Image (tube, helix red, strand yellow):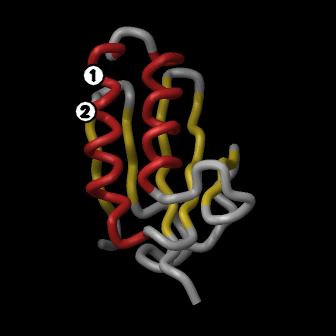
Amino acid sequence: MGDRAMAEIRTDEGSLFFYTHWAGHSLPEQAKAALDKAAPRRGDQSYALKIVVDNLILSSGARDELTGAGLMLTPSAEDSYNNDEPSVVIDLLSWTVSTLGH
């Protein structure tokens, strides 16, 4: 059981993948909110990436928990919405959020 989803966070140095076990249905909205929070650091991808990841972990309910969310360099988790491929793309290059399979 669960509500699993992944987000690919694209940077000019490659991608980082965020996984949520229980909050997949709200990942598109969480991703948009995280990108909005990072807006003051739009010109600095390392800070923007940190803000996006921090907000995704917080909004997934996994902060300070041993389970519920994860980070990967290769998309290797389940995604209930897009055949186990990331269903949300957060692009720090074009500053957009797109959804696939939702």
Residue depicted at x 44% and y 68% = 23
Whether residue 102 sits left or right of residue 92 in the image: it is left
Residue depicted at x 50% and y 59% = 61
Q: Whole-percent x and y of residue 83?
A: 50, 78
Q: Secondary structure at mark 2?
A: helix
Q: How many marks?
A: 2
Asked whether the beta carbons under mark 1 and mark 2 sit within 8 Å of each other, the answer is yes
User: Which residue type carries mark 2?
Assistant: Asp
**The one of 62 and 89 positioned closer to us in this rendering:** 62
Residue depicted at x 70% and y 64% = 67
- Label 1, on which residue? 39
Q: Which mark is residue 36?
A: 2
Q: Secondary structure at mark 1?
A: helix
Relative vertical location of residue 35 with respect to residue 2 in this rendering, above or below: above
Relative vertical location of residue 73 with respect to residue 61 in this rendering, above or below: above
**The one of 93 and 61 positioned closer to us in this rendering:** 61
Q: Whole-percent x and y of residue 42?
A: 32, 16
Relative vertical location of residue 85 with respect to residue 10 in this rendering, above or below: below
User: Which residue type carries mark 1?
Assistant: Ala
Near mark 2 (Cα within 10 A), the count class, few <14, some 14-19 or many ≥20, is: some
Q: Residue furthest front?
A: 64
Near mark 1 (Cα within 10 A), the count class, few <14, some 14-19 or many ≥20, is: some
| Quadrant of the rendered image containing residue 55 | top left
Q: Whole-percent x and y of residue 91?
A: 37, 36
In space, the residues marked 1 and 2 are separated at their CA atoms by 5 Å
Q: Quadrant of the N terminus?
A: bottom right
Q: Quadrant of the C terminus?
A: bottom left
Q: Which mark is residue 93?
A: none
Whether residue 53 sits left or right of residue 33 in the image: it is right
Whether residue 57 sits left or right of residue 73 in the image: it is left
Q: Whole-percent x and y of residue 82?
A: 44, 73
